[in-house]
Image: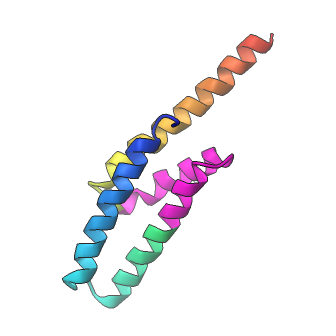
């Protein structure tokens, strides 16, 4: 598994559990609940994109969509940033070795 993906999975699972309790106990008005569900679904799309060749786009989506879920989102942000650093380092090493 690529670096950072495990942190993103853990963060997504924690956010999903917290969203379940928010929806179950009706803490927020229904409009905010719909926004919360939308953010979780798009975040899942970013997570799945990190597993495909669109890794960079998925990592950026994960990074940006983790912001509304602070403090649990920090875990996902770290994982996405770690994944982006890995991709850039790999690209840099490929440029160095091609010379």
Eyeballing the image, is 26 above or below 78?
A: below
Is residue 2 visible in the rendered image? The answer is: yes
- Residue 18 is situated, as x and y percent measured from the top left of the image, at 26, 67
Residue 31 falls left or right of residue 17: right
- Outermost residue, bottom direction? 30
Dividing the picture into quadrants, the one containing residue 93 is top right
Viewed as shown, does residue 34 lie left or right of 14?
right
Q: In this view, does 24 lie above or below 42?
A: below
Vertical placement of 46 versus 81: above or below? below
* Residue segment shown in magenta: 42-68
Please identify the dominant SS of the magenta region. helix
Image quadrant assignment for residue 21: bottom left
Residue 34 placed where, x, y %?
A: 41, 83
Front-lying residue, 41 or 6:
6
Task: Farthest residue to the right: give it.
Answer: 99
The residue that appears at 55% across and 37% down in the rendered structure is 84
The residue drawn where x is 51% and y is 37% is 1
Look at the image and name its color scheme: rainbow
Q: Name the residue located 35 percent from the left edge and 82 percent from the top edge.
A: 32
Q: From the top left corner, tell me how far across and down residue 49 is, in percent.
A: 60, 54
- Asked whether 14 or 28 is in front, the reply is 14
């Amino acid at each position: 598994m690529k670096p950072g993906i495990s942190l993103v999975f853990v963060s997504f699972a924690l956010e999903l559990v917290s969203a379940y309790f928010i929806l179950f106990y009706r803490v927020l008005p229904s409009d905010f609940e719909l926004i919360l569900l939308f953010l979780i679904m798009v975040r899942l799309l970013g997570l799945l994109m990190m597993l495909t060749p669109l890794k960079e786009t998925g990592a950026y989506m994960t990074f940006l969509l983790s912001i509304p879920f602070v403090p649990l989102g920090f875990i996902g942000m770290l994982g996405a940033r770690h994944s982006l650093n890995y991709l850039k380092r790999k690209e840099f090493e490929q440029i160095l070795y091609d010379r």
